Image (cartoon, rainbow, N blue to C red):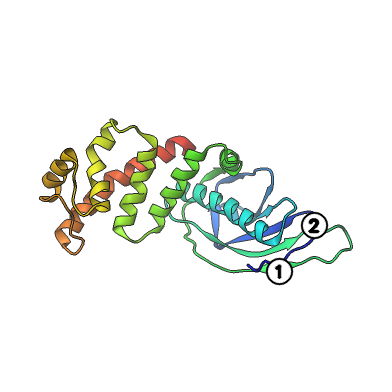
C-alpha cells in the first residue's frame, strides 16, 4: 500500500473483510470492536464477513492493524473447524466527521474452505486481539499454517511447534518425537538420542525427501504430531 494514501484528522478506518464463501454456524457470540456480517436462516447463522474498526491512524497502519485482527480471527476459525480458513480485505474506508470526504482503498485476496457449523464465541479470542496471550497467538498461527500447507515437511514442522511451545523438553511427547523435527532441520543428527531414534524409525540418521519410503514414514509421523497439536489447541479454546 502506498505511503501517499494518508488522511489527517480522521476518526479511524473501517476495514471490511469477506469470506470467499459463506460459513454456516450454529451460533455466534460477537466481540467489541468487530461487527460480523451475518444472515439468520432456519439451519443456523451464515457468517459472511466482518468489519474491523481501527483507531485514528494512517491508511498504511490501518491496513496492517486490520490484517492482524483478521489473521487472529482466521486462526480461531481454522482451529475450530480443523481446516485452513482465510478471507479477503474487500475495502478499507476512513471514518471522517460528518460532511467531510472519505477515502477508500480496495484490495483482494481469496482463500476459503466451507465446513460444518459450530457454536462460535469470539470473546474467547479477545486476549489474542489485545495481545495478552502471546504463546497462544504463536500456537494458533503455527496450527493454521500447518493446516494451510500442502507441503509435508512444513506441516510436520508447524504442528510440532505447537507442542514444542507447550511442553518442556522432558515431556513424553517431545521425548518421543523431537527427532522428527530435528531430522527435518539438519542434514545429519548430532544428538545421540535423536540419532538413535531416527535410525530406529527411518533406518538412518537423516531423511531423503526423494525416497518414497522416507516420505511414507514421515506421513505416519505426521498423524500423532498433528493430533497432539489439535489436542493442545482444542483444550485452550475449549472446542
| 203 to the left or right of 174 | left
Residue that label 2 marks: 10
> Reading the chain from its start, which is encountered first: label 1 or label 2?
1
| 20 to the left or right of 157 | right
Q: Return the mark for residue 217.
A: none
Which quadrant holds residue 168? top left
| 175 to the left or right of 230 | left
Name the residue at the front extreme: 190
Q: On screen, 11 above or below 197?
A: below
Secondary structure category for the residue under label 1: loop
Relative to the observer, which residue lies in front, 69 or 16? 69
Location of residue 227 in the rendering, given as x and y in whole percent from the top left corner: 33, 43
Relative to the observer, which residue lies in front, 14 or 181? 181
Disc 1 versus disc 2: nearer the observer: 1
Q: Residue at x 59, y 55 (%)?
A: 46
Q: Does the residue at mark 1 contact the one at mark 2 (Cβ under 8 Å)?
A: no
Secondary structure category for the residue under label 2: loop
Residue that label 1 marks: 4
Question: Disc 1 versus disc 2: distance between alpha carbons?
Answer: 15 Å
Q: On screen, 11 above or below 136?
A: below
Location of residue 27 in the rendering, given as x and y in whole percent from the top left corner: 58, 45
* Crowd tier of the residue under label 2, counting other residues whose Cα lies within 10 Å: few below 14, some 14–19, many 20 or above: some
Location of residue 104 in the rendering, given as x and y in whole percent from the top left corner: 73, 67
Q: On screen, 224 above or below 170?
A: below
Q: Residue at x 59, y 56 (%)?
A: 67
Q: Residue at x 70, y 52 (%)?
A: 54
Amino acid at each position: 500500500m502506498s505511503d501517499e494514501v494518508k488522511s489527517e484528522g480522521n476518526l479511524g478506518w473501517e476495514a471490511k473483510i469477506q469470506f470467499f464463501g459463506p460459513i454456516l454456524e450454529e451460533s455466534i457470540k460477537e466481540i467489541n470492536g468487530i461487527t460480523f456480517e451475518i444472515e439468520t436462516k432456519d439451519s443456523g447463522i451464515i457468517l459472511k464477513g466482518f468489519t474491523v474498526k481501527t483507531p485514528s491512524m494512517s491508511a498504511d497502519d490501518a491496513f496492517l492493524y486490520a490484517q492482524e485482527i483478521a489473521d487472529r480471527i482466521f486462526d480461531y476459525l481454522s482451529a475450530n473447524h480443523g481446516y485452513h480458513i482465510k478471507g479477503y480485505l474487500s475495502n478499507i474506508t476512513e471514518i471522517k466527521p460528518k460532511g467531510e470526504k472519505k477515502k477508500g482503498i480496495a484490495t483482494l485476496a481469496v482463500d476459503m474452505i466451507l465446513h460444518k457449523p459450530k457454536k462460535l464465541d469470539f470473546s474467547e479470542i479477545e486476549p489474542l486481539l489485545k495481545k495478552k496471550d502471546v504463546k497462544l497467538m504463536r500456537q494458533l498461527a503455527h496450527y493454521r499454517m500447518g493446516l494451510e500447507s500442502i507441503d509435508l515437511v512444513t506441516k510436520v514442522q508447524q504442528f510440532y511447534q505447537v507442542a514444542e511451545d507447550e511442553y518442556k523438553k522432558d515431556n513424553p511427547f517431545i521425548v518421543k518425537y523431537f527427532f522428527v523435527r530435528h531430522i527435518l532441520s539438519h542434514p545429519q543428527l548430532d544428538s545421540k538420542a535423536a540419532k538413535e531414534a531416527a535410525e530406529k524409525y527411518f533406518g538412518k540418521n537423516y531423511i531423503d525427501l526423494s525416497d518414497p519410503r522416507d516420505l511414507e514414514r514421515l506421513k505416519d509421523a505426521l498423524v500423532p504430531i498433528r493430533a497432539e497439536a489439535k489436542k493442545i489447541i482444542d483444550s485452550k479454546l475449549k472446542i
